[in-house]
Structures are given as C-alpha cells and as structure tokens.
Image (spheres, rainbow, N blue to C red):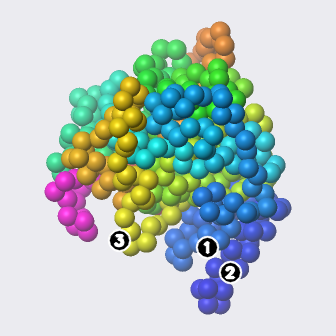
Amino acid sequence: MSSSKVSTAMAKMAASVLEHGEDAIRRLFKFYKRRCPPPDFRDVVDFSTNVKNERVVFLELDPAAVSEGEACKAGLRPVKEWKAYGLQGYSGFVFIANPFLPGSQQHWVKQCLKTYPQKPNVCNLDMHMSPSETEDIWRQSAQTLRNKSSGKREPRTLLEKLRWVTLGYHYNWNTKTYSADNYAPFPTDLQSLSTVVASACGFPGFKAEAGILNYYRSDSSLGIHVDESELDHSQPLLSFSFGQTAVFLLGGTKREDPATPMFMHSGDIMVMSESSRLLYHAVPCIVPPPAGAPLPACLTQQPEKDVLEGGVITSVLKEDWELCSRYLQTSRLNMTVRQVLGVSQVFPSIETPGRSEINLKDGYDDVEEEEDLKAKKRKDDECCGLSLT
Ligand code: OGA
Ligand code: MN
C-alpha cells in the first residue's frame, strides 16, 4: 500500500474508533503519537476554525459573572466576546478559544519559564538535584541558550530539561496525593486568572489551590490519565495552553469509551467540570509547525496600555521574550489549576504507605510505560513527567 493509502486507512480507523472502540483512547493515542509517516489530522476537532462540526455546540457564558475590568486585569477579553464551545456527550466540558487580550500571553509564558520554576515551587529537576543546583534555572540556562546555534548538538540546558513544575499544594507523583505540609503559596496572578475563568463558567467559589505546569518539547506526550487526586471533584479543572499546538484526547469514564481528538492552540482554555471532571484524557503529540513558521500572532502582539495597568499582567523584557520565543519555536506550555479541598474540608490523616507500596515515579503513567519497560527506565532516568521517545 502507498503511504497515502495507509494514512487514509488509518484516518478511517481513527474515525471509526470515535464511534465504537475497544480501549479507544489508547488506539487514538498511538495513532496520533506516530511520527513516521505523520498522522492525518483531518478528524481532529479545531475549535478555532471548524466550528461547523456536528458535535460542537456553542455555549453561552454569563457575561455578568465577571466585570470587563476584572477580565482585563487578568489579561482577558470581556466575557461577552469569548467564543465558548461544548461537545455533545460531554456535559461540563467547556472549550474557550483563546480569550486572551493581545500581548497578555507573553506574561504567562514568562512566568512558566522564568518565575514559576523558582523555589519554593517544585520541579522534576528537584527529584535528582539539590535545591542550590535548581535555584535559578532561567539564569543558568539563559546564557547558553542565547548563544546556542540551532542544529548543533550540545548538552541540554536545565530549561530544556524542565518537564513539570507544581504550585500550591505540590502533587506527590509517588503517592498520587496532595498534603497539608507539602505546600507553597499559590501564585496570586494565576489565582486571579483562574478565578475569572471559573466564575465565567459558573464556579464563582473556585479556589486555585494546586497547579501542575507541563513543559512539552516537540516529541513529548502526556499519557492517558484521570485527575482524581483532588479531594473535591465538584470544582472544575482549568487548563491553559501556550506555544505550539497539541492534539488533546478527551475520552470517557472508562478506557473503552470513545475519545474525541481536538487541537489546543496557544491561548486556548479548557474547563473540565461536573460529569466531565473525571474523564480520561491525554496529549499524544505536539503538532509539528511548518518549517520556518513564525510564532502565532497572538503570542507576539504588544499589549495595550490598560492591560498593564492595575492588573496582574506585566510587560516582558525584550531580552526575556527573545528567549521565551526561541523556546516556544519547538515547545508547548500547559498550566492546569485545581481546587484540592472542598469548603471547610481538611486533609485526612493517612498512614504513610510502606516502601514496597510506593511506585517510584516522577510523572504520569504513560501507555508506553505499560508496554515497554525500557522506555520506563529511560523515563525515570530522565526524570520526566511526560514520555519522551
Ligand atoms: C494535566 C493535563 C493536559 C495538557 O496536567 O493533568 O492533563 O493539555 N494536561 O497538557
Ligand atoms: Mn490531566
């Protein structure tokens, strides 16, 4: 069979998996993770263009839930201008196509790369390095990255080795729990952004208590999982994406349930709430941008003055943005924000599991890992929350 016939056949398979599937999300994960030949993306829902898809529904958010001033302070357009979508069969799932004001995405990118990896926050590098070695990842990497000539094989900088950062109640990847004593103050800027988004989606009481930031290189993926470690599932999970586009798979409550692939572009926000709060999901791939393509315009626009006045958005120094934009040429950033505890809920006093019960890991489970112990070993060695192939 010619390669085009193969990809047509594979696309048909991908489409059929949507309707009925045996471990459908796993099959789709493998389909989109494949690199040679690259997968056919025709069945991927694109909320930025393809809103005629029969399963996509327009959602009306309450524009009065957040004042225009409040939205602007968080770097967001007025809620009445947001393009919000749902998907039939996924009640509680909200996709907001890039509601950020021009120039404000740069602030979040800079925070993810320069500010949030700093102590007292925790990152994957801390699993194998001392606090003094990971103290200033940005400063340590900046000089090398600025002088790096593309194409030349050089050791990776710490910034390039960064895979995840945890904020607020730090997620413990080994015990899969949060705890009262493993905590750092949650960043106030991200808290403000989260409050606005959650309020607009009908959750005015949302408290941003924990964050997981994911750093994806062009070959990274995030394995199939459910975010169930939070003690209160009545509050939504918020997800913010910046940089390169990813394919996101949204499955059901069981691995066998059908899954829907969708693009997540820079600035897109996803909210998983109510009956969509505990669905299986994964990121099988980062979509390769055309060679030499510039970053999307929404990342390079300059902010209007009012965005920088009195709100949380800061202007990014030219020299800092140069490094951020270089990083984003091949990378994607994702911030997920969670409420861990219900109103007046406290952490239960749990017994520490015995050593043998602890499955030492430093990231999400990954489908590759189940099958390929070598890949797992490599993943552990590299200390990645994301699988790298
Ligand atoms: C997560 C997650 C998805 C993404 O961090 O739990 O599912 O889009 N992230 O990176
Ligand atoms: Mn998740």
Mark 1 → mark 2, Cα distance in angstroms: 8 Å
Q: Secondary structure at mark 2?
A: helix
Figure check: 341 above or below 246 = above
Magenta highlight: main SS: loop
| Tag in front: 1 or 3 | 3
**Residue that numbered label 1 is attached to:** 40
Q: Are marks 1 and 3 in contact (CB under 8 Å)?
A: no
Q: Label for residue 8?
A: 2
Q: Are marks 1 and 2 in contact (CB under 8 Å)?
A: yes
Q: Which residues are magenta?
A: 145-156
Q: Label for residue 292?
A: 3
The answer to which image quadrant residue 104 occupies is: top left
Figure check: 74 above or below 322 = above
* First along the sequence among labels 1 and 3: 1
Residue 255 locus on image (x, y percent): 75, 50
Q: Determine if residue 259 is in view.
A: yes
